[in-house]
Image: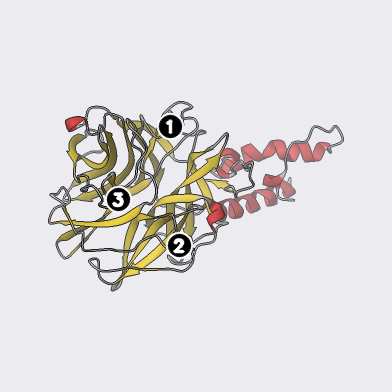
Amino acid sequence: MDLLEIRWRPFSHIAPATLRAVAAVPALLAAFGLSAASQVAPSGYPDGRPAASYRLDAKDQGIVLRHGDGPGQCDMLGAREALIFKDRGVYHLFYDGAGPKGWLACLATSTDLKSWKKQGPVLDFGKPGENDSAAACSPWVIREKGTWHMFYLGTPNASSPPDRVPSFPYLTMKAKSASLSGPWIKQRDVVPFRTRRGTYYQDTASPGHVVQRGERYLMFFSASMKRTIGIARTKNLDGAWAVDPAPIVPPDEQIENSSLYFEPANRTWFLFTNHIGLDGGEYTDAVWVYWSKDLERWDPRHKAVVLDGRNCTWSSRCIGMPSVIRVGKRLAIFYDAPGGAGTSHMGRDIGLAWLNLPLTPPGSALSNKARAGRTALHRD
């Protein structure tokens, strides 16, 4: 039996040698730079949805952007779904500002990730009857030949005031700009892709991280219901996208809104995503990460918890969407949360956590070092 799989049982007949071996595990792992708590994740949801087997614990810095003081009351009711990009030495943090008329994509800028200047909304609501009349938010951007392309979430539906939370369908819409900070011009004649009845993206087909591979672009978009991630493909950012017939992982994984990082040290892709948990109702309970050598093939077993109530310093239950960016020898992970034991969509702030680079898949690191540790135990 793997020592890391031994669990304490309230029985007096456990052999003393077994107890000594179990007791030695924390010290042994510490000698190899590991800890059982940081490597093995708790499991189990009431409905049997999959849980992560490992942890890749980020170190939480806490809140870096609070809601409530944005220009024109743009984030008076909350700030969430932080998306981080960098251009010419300036970090651009797009986020969903919950204002008096609904949710819009807003922008804050910084040169050091410490002091932020809120710029206000970068998009406006569409006209009545248009697909973004109730919300225009959650933008993902990519630059091609001097032009910035934005793919944002639009919907004609929202909950009642004052919250005005966007509701289905979530649609991918398009805008462009010569500058990352705008002004952004909506391209209503461009329809990247839409929801489709009878598919895994029949309720939502909202934008996600865009990666260029040669002449092609791949978008890791959010789909539901159940929640999952799919890949859409195109050679023309101002054209239509072809959606893969199946998601990258089974919908039972219950994930949405993902951000990618490629680790050159081991040529591994890491997909950071928001997991939906179940505890008296569904809500986003953690940031998970999946890893793969192949950007287009993902194994649902290869996942770990990165941030949840165990290591977040200010939100004990609910953790929102992640986006990541390399900063020197660390990976910055932006996320949102309501704080405390809350799970509300409203009143959220934006936090920042960190992982040291290079990233190593926790399963492989655990396997190799634990195997060495077992050999050392047997010698004793």
Q: CA distance from mark 1 to mark 2?
A: 29 Å
| Nearer to the camera, 333 or 27 | 333
85 vs 199: above or below: above
Q: Secondary structure at mark 2?
A: loop
For label 3, the residue is 154
What residue appears at the point 74 percent right and 36 percent down from the top-left corner? 8
| Nearer to the camera, 288 or 282 | 282
Q: Earlier in the sequence, mark 2 or mark 3?
A: 3
Q: Nearer the viewer, mark 1 or mark 2?
A: 2
10 Å crowding of disc 1: few (<14), some (14-19), many (20+): few
Does residue 164 show up?
yes
10 Å crowding of disc 2: few (<14), some (14-19), many (20+): few
Indicate the amino acid at tag 2.
Answer: Arg
Q: Position of residue 147 (x, y in %)?
A: 16, 61
37 vs 362: above or below: above
Q: CA distance from mark 1 to mark 3?
A: 21 Å
